[in-house]
């Protein structure tokens, strides 16, 4: 999976198309990501002895194929490639060849 935690991504398909946000959690085994402010779901919390009853709004996971990495400098989405430099694998912008990390 080419997307990591704390990356800025833009949704390219689905009901949230065109919105961008920061990746809060990446789940490579399920090929899903949780993005801040995207796919917000409501969860009803029951009352307990310690907590009051409330309605919580949490972000749900979306498929990683529905998001692309967003470059703030260029202001557009980019494709991610890999290059091996000095024995380490690094992510690069496919269009310009510049390192992402």
Image (spheres, rainbow, N blue to C red):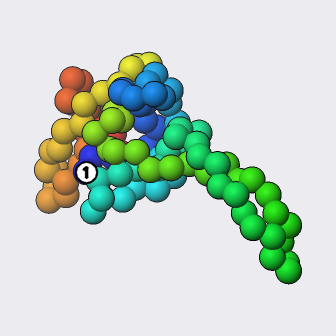
**Would you call the spot at circle 1 few (<14 residues within 10 Å), some (14-19), or many (20 or more)?**
few
Q: Is residue 26 above or below residue 51?
A: above
What is the residue that sits farthest to the bottom in this orientation?
A: 49
Q: Is residue 64 above or below residue 55?
A: above
Q: How many marks?
A: 1
68 left or right of 18?
left
Q: Give residue 7's position: percent from left, percent from top.
A: 44, 43
Name the quadrant containing residue 78: top left
Q: Residue at x 46, y 38 (%)?
A: 8
Pick whichever, 8 or 44, lies toward us: 44
Q: Residue at x 19, y 39 (%)?
A: 81
Name the quadrant containing residue 98: top left
Q: Give residue 57's position: percent from left, percent from top.
A: 67, 49
| Quadrant holding the C terminus | top left
70 left or right of 28?
right
Pick whichever, 8 or 39, lies toward us: 39
Q: Give residue 50's position: percent from left, percent from top.
A: 85, 78
72 left or right of 96?
right
Pick whichever, 45 or 40, lies toward us: 45
Q: Residue at x 85, y 80 (%)?
A: 49
Q: Give residue 35's position: percent from left, percent from top.
A: 50, 44
Residue at image mark 1: 1
Pick whichever, 61 or 23, lies toward us: 61
Whether residue 18 is visible: yes
Q: Is residue 18 above or below residue 39?
A: above
Dot 1: what SS?
loop
């Amino acid at each position: 999976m080419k997307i990591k935690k704390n990356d800025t991504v833009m949704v390219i398909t689905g009901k949230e198309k065109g919105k961008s946000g920061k990746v809060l959690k990446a789940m490579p085994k399920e090929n899903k990501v949780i993005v801040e402010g995207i796919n917000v779901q409501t969860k009803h919390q029951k009352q307990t002895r310690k907590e009051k009853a409330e309605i919580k709004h949490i972000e749900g996971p979306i498929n990683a194929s529905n998001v692309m990495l967003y470059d703030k400098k260029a202001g557009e989405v980019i494709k991610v490639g890999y290059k091996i430099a000095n024995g380490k694998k690094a992510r690069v912008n496919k269009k310009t060849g510049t390192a992402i990390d």
